[in-house]
Image (cartoon, rainbow, N blue to C red):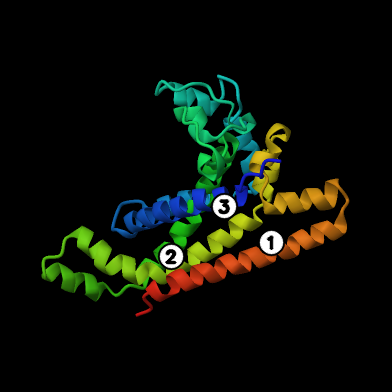
Amino acid sequence: MAMPPPNPFYYAFGSIPIQLILALLLAYVLFQNIKGKSFFRMIFFMPYITPTVATAVVFGKIFAPGENSLINQFTATFGGDAYRWLQERRPFLEVVFGWDVQGFFAGPSMAMVAIIIVGIWMYTGYNAVIFLAGLGNIPKDLYEAARVDGASEWILFRRITLPLISPVTYYLAILGFIGTFQAFNTLYVMRDPRVLDQVNTAALVIFDTFKVDGNYGYATAQSILLFVVILALTQVQRNLFEKRVFYG
C-alpha cells in the first residue's frame, strides 16, 4: 500500500517561506516615504479580513479546469496549457515540467499548489502589517549613522533591518507553521472529491474521521497526535532558530 503524500508539510513549506519573503519585501517598500502608502497598506491587508469561505469559493472559480477559467487564460498568454488545477492529482512538477520524480521529492499535487497560492495571497498582507510594526521599532539613528559611513541600501537592509526584524520573523514563522497544520476552512471548500488524498491536511483528515466516518475515538487520537506533532515542530524551530534571533 502506497504511503499517503505529506500534504501538511507540502502546504507548510510551500507557503510560509514565500509568505514571509514577500511580506518582508512588501513591508520594506511600504515603510518608505512613498505616496499613498496608507492606501496600499489597506489594499494588501484586505485579503486577510475577507471571509475565508468567500475567498475559497472565488478562487475555486478562478482555478476551474476549463480553458475559459481565469487562471488558464492567464497561463495561455505565456504559451501555457490549460490545466485541471483543483482536479489534478498528479504532482505539479510532472504536469508543468514533465519531471518523473517519485516519493516525497515529487512535490505537491497540482491541486495542492493551487491551494498554496491561495494561502500566500491571503496571509502575505497580514504578515506585512506585522513586519511594518517591527520596522517602526528600529531606531532611525542606526540607519543615519550607517549612511554617514557610506552604507548602501542593500547593506542597510542586510546588516540592520534583517537582524533587528528577526524576532518578528521568528514569531511569524512559528505562528504560520502552526496555522498551516491547523488549516481547515479554505481547504475544505476548495478540495475536490477526486483528489482528496492529495490535498487533505491533518485537520481535514480528523474532520472526515469524526464527521464522515463517525469514529469519534479515532478522531480524538488523531487530534492528540496532531497536537504532539505541532508541539514537536515548534520545539524544533525553537532549537534551530531562537539562538539566531537578535533581541537587541
- Mark 2, other Cα within 10 Å: few <14 / some 14–19 / many ≥20: many
Position of residue 145 in the picture relative to residue 119 (left or right): left
Percent position of residue 108, x then y: 55, 41
The residue located at (74%, 65%) in the rendering is 224
Circle 1 sits on which residue? 226
Q: Secondary structure at mark 2?
A: helix
Work out whether 141 lies above or below 177: below
* Residue kind at label 2, given as amino acid type: Thr
In this view, the residue farthest toward the right is 214
Q: Foreground residue, 55 or 79?
A: 79
For the residues labelled 1 and 3, say whether their Cβ atoms are less than 8 Å apart.
no
What's the amino acid at mark 3? Phe
Residue at (32%, 72%) from the top-left corner? 138
Is 245 situated left or right of 10 in this image? left
- Name which residue lies at 58% across and 53% down: 49
Q: CA distance from mark 3 to mark 2?
A: 19 Å
As shown in the figure, which amino acid type bears the numbered disc 1?
Leu
The structure residue drawn at horizontal position 68% and vertical position 51%, both measured from the top left corner, is 184
Mark drawn on residue 169: 2
Q: Earlier in the sequence, mark 3 or mark 2?
A: 3
Residue 24: quarter of image:
bottom left
Residue ID for mark 3:
9
